[in-house]
Amino acid sequence: MVSQRGVLNLYHSDAQRDAYARRGNGMMLHGVDAELLDAAGVRRMLPFLDFDNARFPIQGGLLQRRGGTARHDAVVWGYARAASGRGVDIIQNCEVTGLIREAGRVTGVETTRGSIRAQKVGLAVAGNTSRVAAMADLKLPIESHVLQAFVSEAIKPFIPGVLTFGAGHFYISQSDKGSLVFGGDLDGYNSYAQRGNLPTVEDVCEGGMALMPALGRVRVLRSWGGIMDMSMDGSPIIDHTPVPGLYLNAGWCYGGFKATPASGFCFAHLLARDEPHEVARAYRLDRFAMGHLIDERGVGPQPNLH
Amino acid sequence: MRIQCPFCGERDLSEFSYRGDAGFKRPDAAAPGAGGRFFEEVYLRVNPAGAHDELWYHVFGCRSWLKVTRNTRTHEILAVAPGGALDPPASRS
């Protein structure tokens, strides 16, 4: 279920090495393990990578040995069972069709199965954040984008950990069933279609081939697309909204599952105490107006670049 | 997905680069509340599920800006027009 098989982020230039050294130091300052490997260190771990690639030479990688993979759906079910056991009602097949407002305050939701009154309403509806927020006349700094992911046929154990390419947006790991799980960039245009298009498929496969040509004969079995809440600075939003009674947890872009336990904890803190958790204080909705953006890529208000 | 460029004809998606919502209207910098208006235009989006007016750049073709109306649920292209000039800034009185 939880497999701490290691996450290795490859770097391909001196500048990227320095950036990853800084990232690793940041991790260690927070008590998280990080090691910076040189090319020889990467070659010892993963000899099948293309070390002769003149265009994207592998100079080394940032390794977090305790990182890895987890059965994401099992995590969701675990939370659901525990919440249900504590008296939380989880109502499925029940679409929110409106937000009830009285004297300017949100006091509940309209649904396809009736009204539900509430003192506080929290939105955590990534992908559809703008659509639900519009029910309270809110316009947000978010665009919905498609991210494709791919699964190959099952093969014998090949990739021991999680690997990311540093010269293109490509990641890969191998599931316990033997399938290679991989993906890359957003398609790059607004979408609610939950599927993408072939230029991105080609781009992702090119990244994989540049990294490990051995992938060339593996067949792609399945692909799908999800709806990403892309924010205007690439960082999430956990905050009150300007509408009293309505709270927001959104803008997680494509960095979803791995952050959900902490994201949920901080959102619960905000809902319970009306104050942000200290680690989430910077994820304010008004940071865009105030200039306190958290733009790790430094690309500005262009969601498809984050 | 293919886009019917008015100058080049129907071309594959990979020839184009996406900018985003075409609804940007440059506010009058001299008007009261201009700061707030600029913030809204730069950062806030309708982000609809359905017909969406957006700007695409034909980077590997004629390099024109195109105003495309596309259904974000189905990716069906509903209309394409040359981008033309953005609305000129409101004149100062």
Image: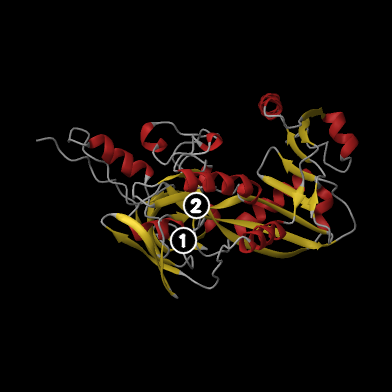
Going 79% across and 39% down the picture, which residue do you hit? A66
Give residue A38's position: percent from left, percent from top: 82, 27
Cβ–Cβ below 8 Å for labels 2 and 1? yes
Asked if residue A135 lies left or right of residue A70, the reply is left
- Of the two numbered discs 2 and 1 on the same chain, state the one appearing first in sequence: 1
Query: In front: B65, or B92?
Result: B92
Asked if residue A36 lies left or right of residue A269, the reply is right
Instruction: Work out whether residue B57 can be spotted.
Output: no
Going 27% across and 46% down the picture, which residue do you hit? B25
Which SS class for mark 1?
Answer: strand
Q: How is the image coloured?
A: secondary structure
Say if B92 sits above or below A273 in the image: above
Q: Chain of mark 1?
A: B
Q: Residues within 10 Å of mark 2 (few under 14, many from 20)?
A: many
Which SS class for mark 2?
Answer: loop
Give residue B93's position: percent from left, percent from top: 9, 35
Going 77% across and 33% down the picture, which residue do you hit? A61
Asked if residue A161 lies left or right of residue A202, the reply is right
Q: Chain of mark 2?
A: B
Task: Give the residue at mark 2.
Answer: B16
Give residue A33's position: percent from left, percent from top: 76, 31
> What kind of residue is marked 2?
Phe
> What kind of residue is marked 1?
Ile
User: Which image quarter holds the C terminus of chain A?
Assistant: top right
Going 53% across and 34% down the picture, which residue do you hit? A278
Determine the residue located farthest toward the bottom in the rendered image. Answer: A113
Query: In front: A95, or A78?
Result: A78
Q: Residues within 10 Å of mark 1 (few under 14, many from 20)?
A: many
Give residue A196's position: percent from left, percent from top: 58, 61
Task: Give the residue at mark 1.
Answer: B3
